Amino acid sequence: MDNDPATRTPPSNGRLWTDPREEDEAQPWLKPRKPIAPQPPLREPEDPDDGDDDRRRRIVRGGLLATLLILAVFGAGFLVNGVFGGSDAPQRATLPAIPGAAPADQRSRTVRAIYAAASPSVVSVRVNTGSGTASGTGFIIDAGGSDGTIVTNAHVVGSATTAEVHLDDKASAINARVVGKDESTDLAVLKVSRSDIAGRRALPLAESNDVQVGDLAIAIGYPFGLERTATAGIVSGIGRTINAPNNFQIDKVIQTDAPINPGNSGGPLLDSAGRVVGVNSQIATTTGGSVGIGFAIPSDTVRTVVPRLEGGGSIKRAYLGVGTQTAPASPGALVGSVVPSGPADAGGLQAGDIITSIDGRVVTSPDEVSSAIESRTPGDSVDIKVQRGGSTQTFHVKLGTRPSAAGGYTTSPTPGTP
C-alpha cells in the first residue's frame, strides 16, 4: 500500500577586436594618417632584352592584387555578417533528420494534449488503515451509470470498505465505496455518486495486446502525496510477470520507464491517443523510488475483471496447484513445486515433470500453463501431458478453486504460479 508520501550573456567588459581602446592601447593602424606626397616610382635600369620578363612580372603582380582584393571583400563580408550581426551568427550546419522521426517538439505537444484531456479523470484515493492514511491514485472508467465507477489497485484500498476521493488537487473529499477487489490481479473498484463526477469523462481502454515496445507511455498520478503529476517515457517491455499481493502471478504485464513512485499506484498508463493501456501497480527498485522500471496491469485484464467486481461479487478462479518455470533443455514448463493435497498432487503430477500440453493445447512456457488454467472454471477436468524420466505420460486432473493466497508448496514458489 502506498504511503503519503541558453542563452549566454556576453561579459560586460567584452570587446570586439575593432573596439576603440584607451590612449595607452592605441592602434595606429586603425587611425587615419596624413596623406603621403606621391613619390616617383622606382625603376630599374631598362634592358632592351628583358621586355618579356617585365610583362610577366606585371601579370603576376596584377594577379596577386586581384587575389588580395577578393580576399578583402570576403573578409569584410565576414566582419559585417559574423561580427556585427548582420545575419544570424554563428551559422551552424543543419543535421539530417532521422528517417521517420517526428519534429523535436511533437512529443511534448502530445504529452501536453493528453494530460489536458485525461487529467480531470484521474483522482487521488486515500484510505484510513486504522493506523494512518494510505494514498494512491485512481481513474474514472464509467461516468454514465447510476453511479460513477473508479478503478484503482487492490493494494491501495487494502481491507477498507470506504475511501476518500479527491477530483482535483484542492477539492474537498468525496466519499467512495469499495464495491469489489481482486488481489490476484491487484485491481479494485470504487463507486461514487454520479453527481459528484458530473462533467468528467471516462477514460477509454486500449487493447493492451496491441502495445509494442517503444510506444509512448504517459503516467498520471499522485506520487508521494504530491499534487497531480504527469511523467512520460516509453513501453520498455511487454509480457512481463509480477507477483500479485496474494503472491499469485499476474501475466502479460506492461513494463515502462515512465517514472512511477509510491502514490502512483492505481493510476492510468496512457498511450499516444490518451487511452489506458494499463494500471500502474509496481516498481522494481533498490532505492525505494523509481529507477525506470515500472509495471502496469494490462488494460485487457481490466476489461475482464472490472465488470465482475462492479456487482460486488468475488472472482473464483480455477486452480492447478503447481509452481512452474522455464524448462532448461526442451519446450514446455518445468514443474518446480506441487501443493500438497492440491489438484495437481491429487492427479499425480510431480516436481520435475515437464508439462508439454493441457487438453491438447501445446505448452512451451510457464505463461501458457497459466493461460490454459485461467480459461477454465473450478471443477473442470483437464488432461495434462508431461515428460517424465524420458517418457511421455498423461494425467487427468480436476481443477480446484484458487485460495485467497499462494502457499503450501513442496518447494519454494517459482515464477509462473497458476
Image: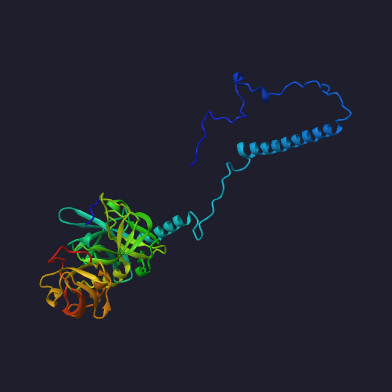
Q: In which quadrant of the rendered image does the C terminus lie?
A: bottom left
Q: Image check: 358 left or right of 130?
A: right
Tell me where residue 142 appears, x and y as whole percent.
32, 69
- Count of numbered circles in the view: 0
Tell me where residue 239 appears, x and y as whole percent.
31, 66
Q: Is residue 310 visible?
A: no
Tell me where residue 360 appears, x and y as whole percent.
26, 81
Q: Image check: 313 left or right of 90?
A: left
Q: In which quadrant of the rendered image does the N terminus lie?
A: bottom left
The quarter of the picture where residue 143 lies is bottom left
Of 141 and 196, the residue lying toward us: 141
The quarter of the picture where residue 214 lies is bottom left
Tell me where residue 212 appears, x and y as whole percent.
38, 65
The quarter of the picture where residue 20 lies is top right
Q: Is residue 45 visible?
A: yes
Of 249 and 345, the residue lying toward us: 345
Q: Residue at x 65, y 37 (%)?
A: 80
Q: Image check: 83 left or right of 40?
A: left
Of 72 and 199, the residue lying toward us: 72
Residue at the limit of the structure toward the left, as seen here: 341
Q: Image check: 70 left or right of 42?
A: left
Residue at the limit of the structure toward the top, as seen here: 24
Residue at the limit of the structure toward the right, as seen here: 48
What kind of colouring is applied to the model shown?
Answer: rainbow
Question: Taking 187 as reference, is 134 above or below it?
Answer: above
